[in-house]
Every structure is written in structure tokens, then in C-alpha cells.
Image (cartoon, rainbow, N blue to C red):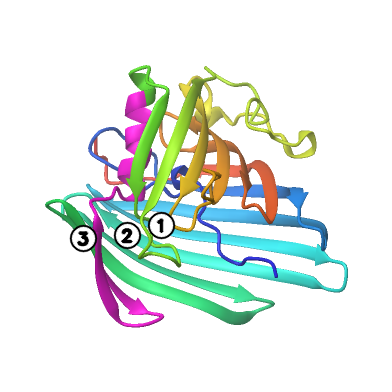
Amino acid sequence: MIGVWLVFPAVLIATGSVAATLAPHRAVYDLVLTSKSMDLVDGSGRIAIELRQETCGKFDLDYRFVARFEREDATVVTDQQTVSTEDSVANTFTFETKTFVDSAPAWVIRGKAVNSGTSTKVELEEPEVRSFELPLSVFPSAHTMELIERAKAGERIVETKLFDGDNEADRLLSTTAIISPVGDATSFGEGAGQADDVAREVPDELRGLQAWRVDESYYNSDSDPDGLPLFQTTYILYENGVSGSIAFDTGDYGFSGALSSLHLLDGAGCN
């Protein structure tokens, strides 16, 4: 059975912070299958995101990941659609993700998380109404900004407790990121395990920006007792919060890809 949930690299869904200016933008990533389980023959995918900033400190995200898996006996299409709002002033993160398999609803998760004191308090509305607390965790925007700021400071390893509203939200998610500088890359294929046939030239909007390669591993209470992560990602992170080339592996399958389009959007003019 092909897993239909994917927690994508947090940088792709970064949602702003007062620590630096992130660029509201619309981006599309074309993906090719790079690794597969035994019953997978081939696959492809696309990620489309739109990050908007109407008010300083608050960002709205529309995110969609569609993947086509060619199996030995059938073709399966998964469609993950996420909308979220992160408010860095109120320390809140609201989220809703709907997942479809072959156009049929398969999963919904919806709720709100609030950071207060030493804990992250989560109120779920779907798939069931319940609440719980986690150790104080970082929301996606703060995590991205932490990576950028610490990369600029020359740090190379960042460990984070992360809450991003995935379908196992009550299990504490943690990440370990290894950061390597890449400078002003000339191709999104550089340094991120990118397949040659989907590499793209860096668009003008990103030229001259400082960039890093980030290799990030994700863990929770279900992680392998031998220390293997639940999944891994590699991506090129630019100083304005946009990702270039990307690659990820869930254990069941892996994809890599690059930007096929990027449009910077007007925002609230925050610094």
C-alpha cells in the first residue's frame, strides 16, 4: 500500500517570521521518482504552493502535492491539499489537510495549535475532536527562519522539535538538519540529489542570493529503534525562504525535482 501522507520539507511551506524577510511567492515543482518499493514501476508528481502575506506576522499557505504511482497491477493517484495560517504574533498555527486517492476522499486533519509557556497545545476538529499537549515545538515558519539564521551564523547542525499538523500530530516530531553552503548556485540540480532531466536554471528572482544545501531527517515515537529516520529530505534553501531543487525519501518511495515556475508576489511590506 502506498502511503498517501507526506510531510514535505518545512522550507517549502515556510510562513514568515520577524527574524528575516521571506518572499511571498507562487511556485511549482516538477518531480520524478527516484526510488521505489517492489510493487512500484514508475511515478511522477507535482507540487504547487502559494504563500501570501496580507498582514505582518501572518502568512497564509495553499499547498498541493499530486503524485502518480504506476504499480504492477494499477495506477494510483494521490492528491494532498493543505491550507494553513501561521501567526507569529499570536503564536498560533491553524491547519487543514485533505488527502484524496484516485479522487476519493481518504483522510482529513484539521485543527489549531498554540504555543504557550513550555508546551504546544493542540485542538483537533477532524478526524475527531480531541486535544493534547506536546513539549514546546516550533511551527514551520519559525523552523525555516531558524535554519536561515543559523546557516548565516555558520552553524552546520540544527535539531528542532517541530509541529506541522501532520496526520500523526500527537506524536512529537523532531528533525535534525545538516547545513552546507552552496553559494550562488547556477542550477537547481547542484547539490540536492537532483535528477538531470528536471534540473532548471536558477530564475532571476533567486540569482545572487545566499543559499545552502539542507539534509534533514525526521523522527517521532515510531522511528526505527536503530536510529533510522521516518523520512529524509534534501533541498536548496535560499535566504528569502524559497526552495530550489528538492529530494525526499519516505522509505516506500522517493522523488526529486526542481522549480518549473516561480513568481514573487506582493506582500504587506514587512521587514
Seen at 61% across and 67% down, the residue is 4
Contact? badges 1 and 3 (CB < 8 Å): no
| Sequence-earlier tag: 2 or 3 | 2
Q: Is residue 95 in sight in this rendering? A: yes
Task: Using the rendered view, name the quadrant where residue 116 is placed.
Answer: bottom left
> Considering depth in this image, is 271 or 84 the residue closer to the camera?
84
Q: Is residue 22 in sight in this rendering? A: no
Residue 135: in magenta span: yes
Seen at 53% across and 23% down, the residue is 207
Lateral position of residue 29 relative to residue 146, left or right: right
Contact? badges 1 and 2 (CB < 8 Å): yes
In the picture of the structure, the residue carrying the numbered disc 3 is 114
Seen at 68% across and 30% down, the residue is 189
How would you rate the neighbour count of disc 2 (Cα within 10 Å): few for under 14, some for 14-19, many for 20 or more? many
- Distance from label 1 to label 2 (Cα)? 6 Å
Name, please, the residue furthest toward the right.
Answer: 72
- Distance from label 2 to label 3 (Cα)? 12 Å
Residue type, numbered disc 2: Thr
Residue 261 location (% of width, % of height)? 61, 44
In the picture of the structure, the residue carrying the numbered disc 2 is 85
In the picture of the structure, the residue carrying the numbered disc 1 is 61
Name, please, the residue furthest toward the front.
Answer: 225
